[in-house]
Image (tube, rainbow, N blue to C red):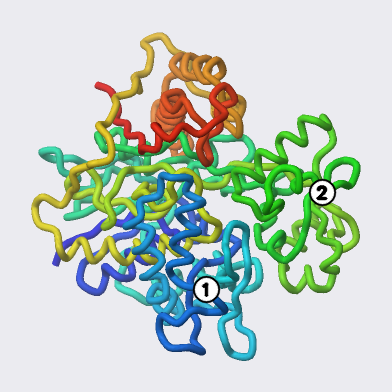
Amino acid sequence: MAHVIVVGSGVAGLTAALDAVQTHDVTLFSKSDLAASNTRYAQGGVAVVIDRMQSPGAPRLGDSIESHVQDTLVAGAGLSEEQTVRILCAEGPAAIDRLIDRGVQFDRIDGELAHGLEAAHSHGRILHAGGDATGAGIAYALIDRLHESAVTVRERTTVVDLVLSGGRAVGVRLLDGEEVLGDAVVLATGGAGQLFPYTTNPEVATADGIGIALRAGAVVADLEFYQFHPTSLNAPGNFLVSEAVRGEGAVLLDADGRRFMLDVHPDAELAPRDVVARGIADQMARQPGVPVRLDATALGGEFLAKRFPNIDAACRAQGFDWGVEPVPVTPAAHYFMGGVRTDEWGRTSVCGLYAVGEVACNGLQGANRLASNSLLEGAVYGHRVVEALALDGEQDRFDSDWAEPVAFDAADPADGVEVNRADLQQVMWDAAGLSRNAADLTAARDELARWVAPQVSDAKSAEDANLLIVARAVVASALARTESRGGHFRSDFPRTDPAQARHSALVKGE
């Protein structure tokens, strides 16, 4: 029986491990507690077209799988791969069935699954669990199943690099030097929010999988596309205020109490995330020192506390009674559309190495992820990667037909200064945040080139090494795309260029 190594414990990694253990020996590594993942903190829900009251495939109040496909393609700003989008939307209902079978308790009304509306969706198709605790509901249910399974679980264990043999991934190397060998390695390490000082991501989101893959020679793609969530609390911790709050009717107000998003986009607060985030940032620049505010008072305190219990608690912990007064919000780094380049089965350009979930880039999210597609991606593609394990032979890799990878300079200077995480985060926020330009990106590239990765001796130094190599790759990608598209906005190239409707691809230079 083959040995499969899974690195990461979000919905993608947990799904892959639980599916794979049916036919393989499986070891799952988590560098912190199993629940310390972006999945655990996801509030918005799971986007899927499903209705138990009708026959399979029947539309729900005008909704359809095709409508979900089109909404995803529109949000992706011309870069979503239609094949991977169609897989997500068509296989979504079966993925929800598997989650329910594994104990996930989605919210229901009169016994039927409840559906909510979120920005850029043409229909109410968002499933929630515990109101605004969907990710936690999924994570804890899957963790319970994991503990009941035969998966070998190693928590608080940092994977530093891949073990390669003849160009093939044959295992992982741990912080203490131990090598754990296997027949396949699945990276499911999540996102990279800690590239920035303001993020909705937990502290563990340090770009580990992308850094590990880059050092192993894997192709990465679309790293210039980072999604900044429009509404995090403008308070320490940047607690996420879910898109679903605006879906329920909350509006954004400027310093004068005016709904400024009406002047920005026809869909106002329910425009795509990149539009809303930049709209807020622009308004904040016009009223320096005064944040914009999210006004949910029309919904009433009782409804808000019941529908969004975690957000309600977070607001109150910061001294805000959002049922009575609007609360200050600000954009924060939220989701990485780019990642390790994979095909629709999770195969990477390195034999034996797979990637799934936010760490991966299979073209699904394009230039701008549609709200609530990420949890579904983990559930759908976490399942598909295990199907690929059963299908693949010795050449279990793909040949990219996206773009010829460009090498970027990842080398540390001989006399450089050891990277400081806070400094790196500020450089990335200033130059590669919501708005970018050639001068700032060039200065960031030069600054990042002055720094050296720390000698890896503990989990933090391993994380810092990953953040440095990925920051260099992000800046290189952002410099190369001389247009604005989705999560990548260039103030010196503010228009979208149809000639650049193509993916980017990078590899580490020699």
Return the residue nearer the eye: 91 or 15. 91
Picture layout, residue 73 above or below residue 179 = below
For image coordinates 42% across by 75% down, the residue present is 93
Give, as a three-letter code, the residue at label 1: Asp
Q: Which residue is mark 2?
A: 259
As drawn, the label of residue 63 is 1
Picture layout, residue 99 above or below residue 327 = below
Residue 336 in view in this figure: no
Q: Position of residue 135 (x, y in %)?
A: 55, 64
The answer to whether 285 appears left or right of 387 in the picture is right
In which quadrant of the rendered view does residue 323 lie? bottom right
**Where the N terminus falls, by quadrant?**
bottom left
For image coordinates 34% across by 43% down, the residue present is 340
How many labels, in total?
A: 2
As drawn, the label of residue 194 is none
Q: Position of residue 240 (x, y in %)?
A: 66, 53
For image coordinates 71% across by 61% down, the residue present is 245
Return the residue nearer the eye: 405 or 22. 405
Q: Position of residue 358 (x, y in %)?
A: 43, 51
Distance from disc 1 to disc 2, alpha carbons, whole Å, reads 29 Å
Q: Secondary structure at mark 2?
A: loop
Return the residue nearer the eye: 204 or 61. 61
For image coordinates 78% across by 55% down, the residue present is 251
Residue 477 in view in this figure: yes
The answer to whether 301 appears left or right of 348 in the picture is right
N-terminal-most mark, 1 or 2: 1
Classify 10 Å Cα crowding around label 2: few (below 14), some (14-19), many (20 and above). some
In which quadrant of the rendered view does residue 28 lie? bottom left
Give, as a three-letter code, the residue at label 2: Arg
Return the residue nearer the eye: 176 or 473. 473
